[in-house]
Amino acid sequence: MTKITQLINLMQPYVDDGKLLKRSYEQLNECFEDFVFITDGDQMLACAGLRHYKDEMKGEIYALAVNKEYHNTGVSSQLMEKLMKRASDFDLIGIFALSKYGGRFFLRHGFVEGVISALPITRQKSYDHQRKSTIFLKKL
């Protein structure tokens, strides 16, 4: 099984629940380098992408998924540590996430609720007003 297929399989329950946006194999293949993973051997336990907005020195966490069998085991905290490390490697001044359901997770990791105007300009333009995701921000 390819890593992209594993990624799709990990994300699928959240896509089915409407918590994550569906992404095709091709879309994930194009942005695969954005992702960090928590694995156990060959099994992918958790993933998240970090899209880099170079002009604003900000990053967007997206497509965050943790295998439901690994909830409340510390895997999500390990994933956030990897995301923070990557953000630090990029010298980002802030990170953000858009979520319909992950509020407690982001608040627990030091994010605060924010407004659209705090997002990078290109992300403000692509914000889906119909989805009405909550914006979570964290200064680094």
Image (tube, grey):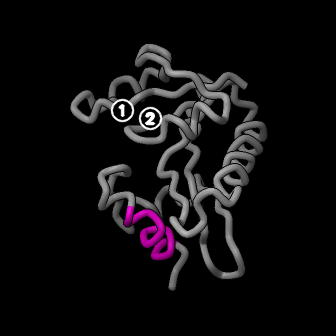
> What's the distance in space between the residues labelled 2 and 1, CA to CA?
5 Å
Residue 3 occupies quadrant: bottom right
**Residue 55 — which label?**
none
- Dot 2, how many residues are within 10 Å of its Cα: few (below 14), some (14-19), or many (20+)? many
- In the picture, the quarter occupied by the C terminus is top right
- Residue named by callout 1: 133
Residue at figure coordinates x 52%, y 51% from the top left: 64
- Dot 1, how many residues are within 10 Å of its Cα: few (below 14), some (14-19), or many (20+)? some
Residue 12: percent from left, percent from top: 38, 66
Residue 94 occupies quadrant: top right
Depth check, front residue: 128 or 105: 105
Q: Magenta includes 12?
A: yes
Q: Amino acid at mark 1?
A: Ser
Residue 68: percent from left, percent from top: 51, 65
Residue 51: percent from left, percent from top: 55, 42
Residue at figure coordinates x 68%, y 60% from the top left: 73
Span highlighted in magenta in the image: 4-13
Depth check, front residue: 75 or 136: 75
Drawn side of residue 8 relative to residue 70, left or right: left
State whether the magenta stretch is mostly helix, strand or loop: helix
Residue at figure coordinates x 45%, y 76% from the top left: 5
**In this picture, is 120 found above or below 109?**
above
Q: Magenta includes 132?
A: no
Residue 120: percent from left, percent from top: 49, 23
Drawn side of residue 54 relative to residue 140, left or right: left
- Residue named by callout 2: 98
Identify the element where label 2 is drawn.
strand
Identify the element where label 1 is drawn.
loop
